Image (tube, grey):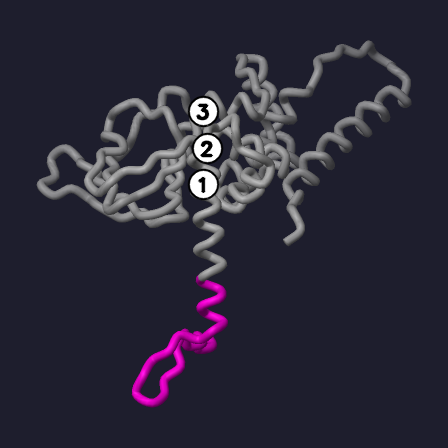
Amino acid sequence: MLPRRPKDYDEGDGERRMKKEVKVWRGVAHYRTCMKRMALQRERGARTMNDLYLLEDIVNDVRFICDLPVALRLDICQVLGYELHGPGHRVCKQGSKAFSFIIIFAGSVKCTYHQLGMQEDKTWIIPAGKWFGDKVLEDWNYTWEFSVDTNEKTELLTLTRRDYEKVLKIKKTPELQERVSFLKGIERFKNLPRQSLLRLANVLSHRIYSKNRSTSTLQNILVTCNLMCYQVHRQKSDVLPS
């Protein structure tokens, strides 16, 4: 059985008074939200390091970003777009080409999926703190699978695939895709996130060794592979102190 949630109010003399510690906590949370909003409203190139550390708190549990090392998460925060819309604004239309991955900073959006032959559309709400369109970061030809409209006054953060790959310094080539496929087939790498595989494949080099090459060379190859694997795993656990 889960413990009961502490009450936010004291009740006495027929009045409900908010507890002092709750007032303080809400005040701090509101202040941090306002500071994040100010950072987002600045031009992307004008955001300071303090701004970026504030914004990193928004993306540190977002798919495709949370597994990145802190330095790259901060770079992502530098290129985030910011949009403010009133209720009823059409964010994207089902079937149209998608260009941005979207995080809901505040407010909420209503998603609508229309299936041919069905009289009623399927609808659902995505609240603040969630995201949608993550497939944009993997597929240049991805089209929206559903329409999205703001459900209320809503603030959105956008990340284009071009900016995402520029931060990761990834140049997509057939050779790189072949390396990623090769790495996926290795037991030690198969569970790594795609962006980790892309970064690893990006630094691999191709060499050919003759038959009966000395064991010292082979040992160097194995040591290099182990160091690369260790580095990727270290990056996955790289976090800032609270």
Residue 22 within the magenta-colored segment of the rendering: yes
Residue 41 image-quadrant placement: top left
Left or right of 216? Residue 10 is left
Q: Is residue 230 among the parts visible in the rendering?
A: yes
- The residue identified by callout 2 is 42
* Secondary structure type for disc 3: helix
Residue that numbered label 1 is attached to: 38
Camera-nearest label, 3 or 2: 2
Give the image location of residue 231, x and y in percent: 72, 34
Q: Nearer the viewer, residue 210 or 162?
A: 162
Q: Position of residue 142 (x, y in %)?
A: 35, 24
Measure the alpha-carbon separation of dots 1 and 2.
7 Å
Under mark 1, the amino acid is: Met
Sequence order check, earlier mark of 3 and 2: 2
Query: On the image, which quarter does residue 236 sit in?
Result: top right
Q: Residue at x 46, y 28 (%)?
A: 43
Query: Is label 1 in a helix, a strand or a loop?
Result: helix
- Within 10 Å of disc 1 (Cα), the crowding (few <14, some 14-19, many 20+) is few
Residue drawn at the location 30% of the way across and 22% of the way down:
97
Which is more N-terminal, label 1 or label 3? 1
Front-most of residues 152 and 34: 34
Q: Position of residue 38 (x, y in %)?
A: 45, 41
Q: Position of residue 37 (x, y in %)?
A: 43, 43
Residue under numbered circle 3: 161
- Magenta-span inclusion, residue 8: yes
Q: Range of the magenta residues?
A: 1-26
Image point 56% across, 38% down: which residue? 52
Q: Amino acid at mark 3?
A: Arg
Q: Residue at x 36, y 84 (%)?
A: 11
**Does residue 172 sit above or below 229 in this rendering?**
above
How far is mark 3 from mark 1, CA to CA? 24 Å
- Assess whether mark 2 and mark 1 are in contact (beta carbons under 8 angstroms): yes
